[in-house]
Amino acid sequence: MHIPDGLLNPTTIIFLWVIVIVVMILGYFKIGKIFEKEDSEKLVPYIGVLAAVIFAFQFVNYPVPGGTSGHLIGGTLIAIILGPWASVIILFLVLVVQSLFGDGGILAMGANAFNMGIIGGIVGFYIVVFIVKILNKTSIRKELKVSIATAIGAYISIILAAFICAIELGVSGAVPYGIAIPAMVYWHLLIGIGEAIISSLIIFYIYRVKPDLITTEPIMMNKVILINISKYKRPITSTLAVTGLLMLMIAVGFTIGILSGAPDGLERVLIDQNGESWLDNLASPWIPLLSWITNDYGAAIIGIVISILIISSTFYLIIRYKKKNTNNSSASHDLMKNA
C-alpha cells in the first residue's frame, strides 16, 4: 500500500502531510507515561527490535491468490505494544527508511503515514480496545482476548486504510472512484488475512514470553496495571538474536521462493487500470539514495540495521526530553509549593 510519487495531486499531498505532522507533534505530548519513568531508556532496544520486525515484514511480500501479494503494515500491532501515538511515529520513520530504497514516495510519505500510521495504528488500536472490552465479559484468557481482538482490529484497519487510499487516488484523478474503491477493498480483503494472522501471533507470543511489553494493557483491560520497567533487562543478546532470525527468515524466503515478487494490492490496481509501463514511469522529485542496492536480501539487511539505528535513536531522544520536561515540571511545582 506504499503510494509512489506522481500519483497524488498537490492539494492531497499537502493536506495529508499537515495532518500527519500535527498528529506526530500531538503524539509526542500524548505518548504514555511509561516513557517518562526513571528506567524508560530500557525500552529503547525493544523498540529497535520492533522496528526491525516491522521493516522486515513490510519489505518482503507474501503471495496472495489472484496474482498479487501483500505485506504486514503493522500499525495496529505497534499500537497494541507501545500505544497508538507511538505507532504513528514509528510507522513514519519506517516509511522514511523504506523511501531510501524507493519503496513509497517521498512526497507521498504523508499519505502513506496517514493510511498506515493513523488509520492502521490509531483507528486499529481503538477497534481492538472496543473488541477487548466485549471479550472481557467472557471467560477467555487475557492473552487470547487481546490476540483475537488484534486479529480483528488489524484486519478491519487494513481494509479501512485501503478504502481511504482508494479515495486519495480518486481525488487525485489517478484512478476513478468506481474502479479504485472496489478494487482496493477487494484485494485487501485477502491481504488483510495475512496482516491479522501475523499481528495476532506476535501479540500472543509476546504475552507468553514478556507480557509487560504490552504497555497498553491498562487501557484495554480498564484497570490500573503497573508496568515495572526497572525489572527489564537490556536485551542486547535478544536484539542480535531477533535481528539474525529476521535475516535468516528473509534469506530462506528468497532462496526457496516463498516470498512473492508479484505486485501488491495498490500496484495491481494501478497496473490493471493504466499498465505497468505507466506505473514505472511515474515522475518522482528525487532518486532514492539506496536505489543502487539491487540485491533484495542485501537491501533487507541494510534496511533492518538502519531502522534499528534511526528508530532507537529517535525514541532515546524522545524519552530523554520527556523525562527532562517531567523533572523540570516537578521541580517548578516543588518550588511553588515551598514558596
Image (spheres, helix red, strand yellow):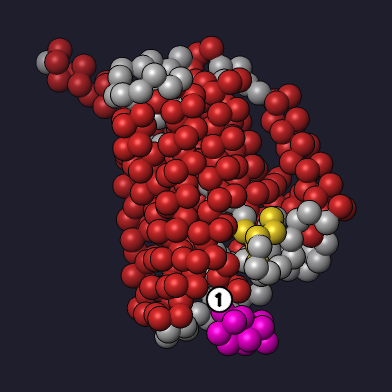
Report whether residue 218 is seen: no
Residue 133 picture quarter: top left
Report whether residue 198 is seen: yes
Residue 267 picture quarter: bottom right
Which range of residues does the magenta coloring cover?
A: 270-280
Out of 140 and 19, give the one closest to the viewer.
140
What residue do we see at 61% from left, 20% from top?
209
| Image quadrant in which the C terminus is located | top left
Residue type at numbered disc 1:
Val
Q: Is residue 126 left or right of residue 291?
A: left
Residue ID for mark 1: 269
| Image quadrant in which the N terminus is located | bottom right
Q: Name the chief secondary structure element in magenta.
A: helix
Q: Can residue 273 be found in the magenta stretch?
A: yes
Q: Where is residue 296 in the image (x, y as percent from the top left)?
A: 79, 59
Label 1 Cα crowd, 10 Å radius (few <14 / some 14-19 / many 20+): many
Q: Position of residue 97 (x, y in %)?
A: 62, 56
Q: Is residue 224 left or right of residue 280?
A: left
